[in-house]
Amino acid sequence: MDDDVAMTAAIVKALALVAAQPAEIVVTANTDDGFGPLFTDLSCNFGLVLVEQRIVETLMGARYATVFGNMFADPMTRMAFQRALGRMGNHPGPMVYGSTTKYDLDHTANRAVLANYMTFDIAAQRLAPSGHAVTPIPVTEYERIPDTDEIIDVHLFANRLIERAHSVEPMLNIEAIDSVADDLVAGGERFRDNLLKGFIEAGIDTDNPLELLLAIRRAGAKNLEAWFGPGEVDEASPRGRRPVVLVENIAELEALGAEVLGDLPADQAEAIRGRGYTACVATTDMHEYGKILLEQVMRGLDVAVVDGGVSADPDDLVAAALAGEADFIALSTYNGIALSYLTKLRAEMAKAGLDIPIYLGGRLNQVPEGSNTSLPVDVSAKLREAGAVTCETLPDLLGRMAETAAPSDRAA
């Protein structure tokens, strides 16, 4: 309930801020940093942009522009999304954000990813300018918050690339790119229309910005896609619908999950399946890909899954684990808060009398108190001292699970 009140207050403040401006303003949003990464169909992402445009321009009388690009790196879909935005009469956009999902610890490989998406972002702006600034992401982004020198360096790299990117333009298949843009627009319009129709039938006032935004936020991306997605019904698809334009990151997660399950030693897989585990899976922040992967692999090993939430408050996570009778918590964290979150979680568990293992993976670092750089440092040892089972990789987690006694044995 506290989260719901806070969410309502935040939306009210945002709407009041827009309404109070004495001059015409442009309201921007980054769907890639919210619901976008949770859709399996990129046309749902575009459809949400159309819904937001209606809220801002039709219902509030302001101007709307959107940021995109965090969560998909494929040049075809990035160019198609930019060209689709151009068809909706969009005002000059803030930025095409660099992809943050393709990097790993190999900086050399990351530079190849950077050059790949930046080349085509630049070409897209040259061929059909939308006003979006191209935004390169430092190659250290995967492991920690980049420092000032790294940010300067990546922008110098991008400036040099701008001088050369025009050479790819004659080789581009614009017809194929526009075909994907067609699918995005058609699918997005169906998503918008389905959502508005469904909400009206549910008694939601879709002409009230606050009520509409709250309904969208409370429904969540997964339900919105399952209920209103434009794709054909397909029980084999993650959301029960075949994506019109598949989000590459979801497809890669599915492939990675299948690979992890395929590579797991047979004795470990058999041990886990025989345990009768129930896992409470959650994230400390809004980055949900680790959670999606965990849930897929857990279900593939016959482990029951309790949804502990995204950006889960520690008390809510404990409540979910208790209600679902979870045997352990599997927690994914991204950057800079691992130790502080674990400390709060352990305090809530002690208060509730919950004593189950906490498996913690992801970016196991913390921004030190009093730091003037905001750069996180590794805190793996401190996390273990605080009672977490730290896991550098998913196979590491599965190995630990296979070694742990069954719940019935522990209870005995």
Image (cartoon, helix red, strand yellow):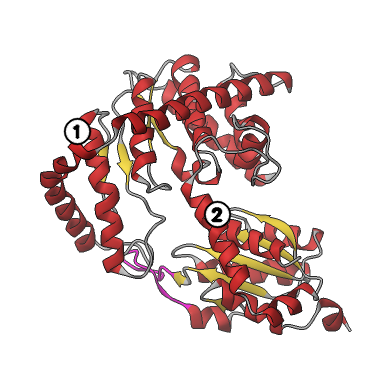
Residue at left 41%, top 69%? 369
Is residue 286 shown to the viewer in this render? Answer: no
User: In this view of the protein, which residue sits in the foreground, 292 or 411?
Assistant: 292
Residue at the (35%, 18%) spot, across then down:
89
Q: Using the image, determine if residue 36 lies above or below residue 87.
A: below
Q: Residue at x 50, y 16 (%)?
A: 59
Tell me: residue 395, above or below residue 7. Answer: below
Tell me the crowding category of disc 2: few under 14, some 14 to 19, or many 20 or more residues within 10 angstroms, Cα based: many
Instruction: State which tag comes first along the sequence, 2 or 1.
Output: 1
Numbered range of the magenta stretch = 366-379
Which label lies toward us, 2 or 1?
Answer: 1
- Judge left or right: residue 247 versus residue 405: left
Residue situated in front as seen by the camera: 130 or 151: 130
- How dense is the environment of label 1, judged by Cα within 10 Å: few (below 14), some, or many (20 and up)? some
- Picture coordinates of residue 106, whole percent (x, y): 33, 70
Dot 1: what SS? Answer: helix
Residue 320 location, quadrant: bottom right
The amino acid type of the residue labelled 2 equals: Glu
User: Does dot 2 land on a helix, a strand or a loop?
Assistant: loop
Instruction: Tell me the residue that label 1 is attached to.
Output: 126
The image shows residue 90, relative to residue 402, as above or below, that is above
Q: Pointer 2: what residue?
A: 288
> Quarter holding the N terminus?
top right
Marks 2 and 1 sit apart, C-alpha to C-alpha, by 34 Å
Magenta span: chief secondary structure:
loop
Towards the viewer: 12 or 37: 37
**Residue 324, placed above or below residue 8:** below
Asked whether residue 370 is drawn in magenta, I would say yes
Q: Is residue 99 found inside the magenta-colored segment of the image?
A: no
Q: Quadrant of the C terminus?
A: bottom right
Amino acid on which the number 1 mark rests in the picture: Arg
Q: Position of residue 97 (x, y in %)?
A: 33, 44
